[in-house]
Image (spheres, helix red, strand yellow):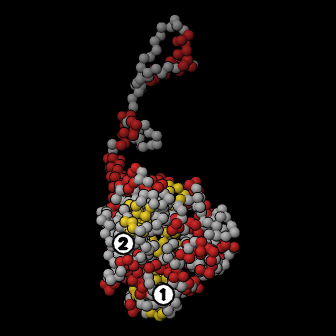
């Protein structure tokens, strides 16, 4: 039965027209394999009639993982090709827009403030800051111990005055070796550790360099006085007339400290020039080898990693080679009686032709070390031309030739009297003469001037700090001013000390830093300090003022925070609003910001002023953001009736759509150093506004 069905199957397929290529029933195939004698042929083909429509390929759709051949079938279709091209050009367009936007932002953005602009500078006289080894003298390790105090003040730049090896005549400003640390302050290893600790905290450090002169103990001077090789002309030597055992100097030049600026040397049998003490002979900067020596010194310390220099006494670098007598201030005065520096016009011993070229060459050396990102090397100069503001401004350099980043500004120290008007005059003198695009700076204390509380009165310490930290530019704070330290009184110094070293009387502003109320104010754990601490140290010290909410220290800290966090104070416009014998009023504002800060500072007696009459667009009320009296912070004041007590300072905050610097009435009374505008839409600064 099975065999019959199997035999009938090929016949049925053939009848239906189906071609069978290789389809054979298993059983028949087996029989054919086993029965080799069978000559019966297998059917070769069979055919089947099918509907042509059924033979078409099924419609495929894209699917994940499709092979290349399938993918190509779809990629050439219009709907996929157009979509792909649209996406491609969208990406290209977006990339171009992004690049253009980036270029525009970079082109329109103002230059970021550099580190020497962004932070106040804290000046340290190292011998008086902190003693670490109980010898009574401050040192480099002591500074390292107190770096947390610097960061507590929100300050990021430290200026350490001279610590070169020195006989310490004139307190170390005549170096015996520019490449060595004076053992009083520590070792080179101590300096390197201090530098590393400063940089680890994200701080910067600048140091003093006085290139004008050296100590008479310096190796160069010893070789020069013996006429040894190239050192023969490293200093300024001249023959002196001798008669009857007395020496007649080459001319009438007088030193800063008084009496002749010429000193006879028994070894060389000539006179050498010293514009300061006789132990500080002037270098001969007409000698190019001397200039190269100073460049090598600069490179040495920059190589150590310092972030900049303050160059002092630079106006004395060159003297006229003709050696003529300098003109007398009082022409009728007997020339033989001239002994004081103020009795001559110093036409031939200061600011000579070529002096600025030398300073610019120092700048070029610093620039060689400023190529790394974030490693710009700062240069300040001591251009204290009290009587000639234009001469001071020359230290900024020109539009095309860079010199100092700024000459240090002592206008607020040199004032002869204190009032709202005198403060205005000191500020305006600098701002109106400063070259366009340059950066101002301010100081209210220094190692060579009486402290604020001793110079103008304790009641004005806080308002002076408020002025310092809200003016445009870089503020410089001399150590101790943040707590209101004063000069030591002569009665604090024993008669034995005064007789043995007049420095105790000459420099009372260099008394030890007052850290706490313990013995020696926490400055030293030794038995005594090189200078006595001020007798007020138990109530004027860092430790106790940190606990007082209304202390000078906490006000200083709040002011530095305000300066760092508020753009108008950080880099905005300053406009003078009002000044009289009692108060000085100015605003700080920024284009694009409706928030304005107004400083009302009293440097006289109790005063009441109507500022709305002066600036009609002022709102009726302003909020006290900061006050020298902390209890007033947050209160509202009537702008028609602003009252201040003697020595009181207010930082007022208000909003306005019409900033003062855009008003015609205040043109010529507004200044900006680094102009910037604020975009609230994008939360960024830009230039063209």
List x then y, in percent, for residue 412: 45, 79
The image shows residue 357, relative to residue 666, as above or below, that is: above
Q: Which residue is mark 2?
A: 252
Relative to residue 670, is residue 641 drawn left or right? right
Q: Secondary structure at mark 2?
A: loop
Q: Nearer the viewer, mark 1 or mark 2?
A: 2
List x then y, in percent, for residue 113: 42, 66
Determine which quarter of the picture holds residue 243: bottom left
Residue shown at 47% from the left, 80% from the top: 467
Residue with the most extreme front position: 244
Q: CA distance from mark 1 to mark 2?
A: 43 Å
Q: Which residue is mark 1?
A: 603
Counting the numbered discs, the total is 2
Residue 631 seen by the camera: yes
Query: How many other residues sit within 10 Å of disc 2, few (<14), some (14-19) or many (≥20)?
Result: many
Determine which quarter of the picture holds residue 554: bottom right
Which quadrant holds the N terminus? top right
């Amino acid at each position: 039965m099975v065999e019959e069905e199997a035999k009938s199957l090929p016949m049925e397929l053939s009848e239906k027209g189906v071609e069978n290529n290789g389809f054979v029933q298993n059983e028949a195939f087996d029989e054919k394999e086993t029965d080799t004698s069978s000559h019966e042929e297998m059917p070769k083909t069979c055919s089947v009639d099918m509907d042509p429509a059924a033979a078409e390929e099924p419609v495929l759709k894209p699917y994940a993982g499709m092979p290349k051949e399938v993918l190509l079938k779809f990629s050439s279709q219009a709907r996929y090709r157009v979509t792909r091209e649209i996406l491609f050009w969208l990406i290209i367009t977006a990339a171009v827009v992004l690049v253009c936007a980036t270029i525009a932002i970079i082109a329109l953005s103002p230059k970021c403030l550099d580190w020497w602009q962004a932070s106040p500078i804290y000046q340290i006289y190292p011998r008086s800051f902190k003693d670490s080894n109980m010898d009574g003298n401050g040192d480099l390790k002591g500074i390292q111990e107190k770096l947390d105090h610097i960061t507590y003040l929100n300050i990021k730049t430290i200026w350490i005055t001279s610590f070169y090896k020195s006989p310490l005549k004139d307190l170390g400003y005549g170096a015996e070796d520019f490449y060595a640390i004076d053992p009083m302050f520590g070792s080179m290893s101590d300096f390197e550790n201090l530098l590393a600790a400063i940089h680890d905290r994200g701080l910067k450090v600048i140091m003093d360099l006085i290139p004008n002169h050296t100590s008479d103990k310096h190796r160069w001077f010893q070789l020069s006085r013996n006429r040894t090789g190239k050192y023969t002309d490293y200093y300024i030597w001249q023959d002196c007339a001798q008669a009857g055992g007395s020496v007649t100097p080459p001319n009438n030049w007088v030193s800063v400290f008084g009496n002749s600026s010429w000193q006879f040397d028994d070894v060389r049998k000539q006179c050498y020039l010293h514009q300061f003490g006789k132990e500080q002979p002037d270098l001969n900067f007409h000698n190019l080898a001397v200039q190269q020596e100073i460049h090598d010194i600069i490179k040495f310390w920059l190589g150590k990693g310092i972030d900049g220099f303050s160059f002092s006494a630079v106006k004395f670098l060159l003297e006229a080679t003709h050696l003529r007598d300098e003109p007398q201030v009082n022409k009728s005065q007997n020339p033989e009686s001239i002994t004081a520096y103020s009795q001559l016009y110093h036409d031939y011993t200061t600011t000579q032709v070529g002096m600025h070229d030398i300073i610019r060459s120092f700048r070029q050396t610093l620039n060689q070390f400023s190529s790394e990102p974030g490693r710009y090397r700062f240069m300040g100069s001591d251009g204290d031309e009290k009587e000639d503001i234009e001469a001071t401004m020359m230290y900024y350099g020109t539009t095309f030739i860079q010199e100092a980043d700024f000459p240090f500004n002592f206008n607020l120290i040199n004032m002869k009297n204190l009032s709202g008007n005198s403060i205005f005059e000191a500020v305006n003198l600098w701002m109106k003469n400063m070259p366009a695009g340059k950066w101002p700076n301010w100081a209210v204390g220094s190692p060579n001037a009486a402290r604020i509380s001793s110079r103008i009165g304790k009641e004005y310490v806080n308002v002076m700090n408020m002025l310092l930290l809200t003016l445009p530019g870089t503020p410089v704070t001399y150590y101790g001013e943040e707590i209101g330290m004063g000069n030591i009184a002569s009665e604090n110094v024993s008669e034995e000390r005064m007789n043995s070293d007049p420095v105790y009387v000459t420099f009372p502003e260099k008394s030890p830093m007052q850290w706490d109320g313990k013995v020696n104010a926490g400055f030293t754990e030794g038995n005594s300090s090189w200078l006595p601490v001020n007798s007020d140290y138990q109530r004027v010290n860092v430790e106790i003022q940190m606990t007082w909410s209304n202390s000078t220290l906490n006000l200083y800290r709040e002011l530095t925070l305000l300066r760092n966090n508020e753009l108008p104070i950080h880099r905005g416009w300053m406009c003078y609003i009002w000044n009289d014998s009692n108060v000085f009023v100015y605003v700080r504002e920024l284009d694009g910001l409706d928030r304005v800060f107004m400083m009302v500072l009293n440097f006289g007696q109790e005063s009441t002023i109507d500022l709305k009459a002066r600036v009609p667009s002022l709102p009726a009320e302003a909020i006290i953001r900061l006050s020298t009296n902390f209890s007033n912070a947050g209160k509202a004041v009537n702008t028609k009736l602003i009252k201040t007590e003697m020595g009181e300072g207010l930082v007022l905050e208000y909003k306005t759509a019409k900033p003062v610097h855009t008003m015609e009435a205040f043109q010529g009374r507004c200044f900006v150093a680094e102009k910037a505008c604020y975009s609230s839409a994008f939360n960024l600064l830009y230039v063209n506004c």
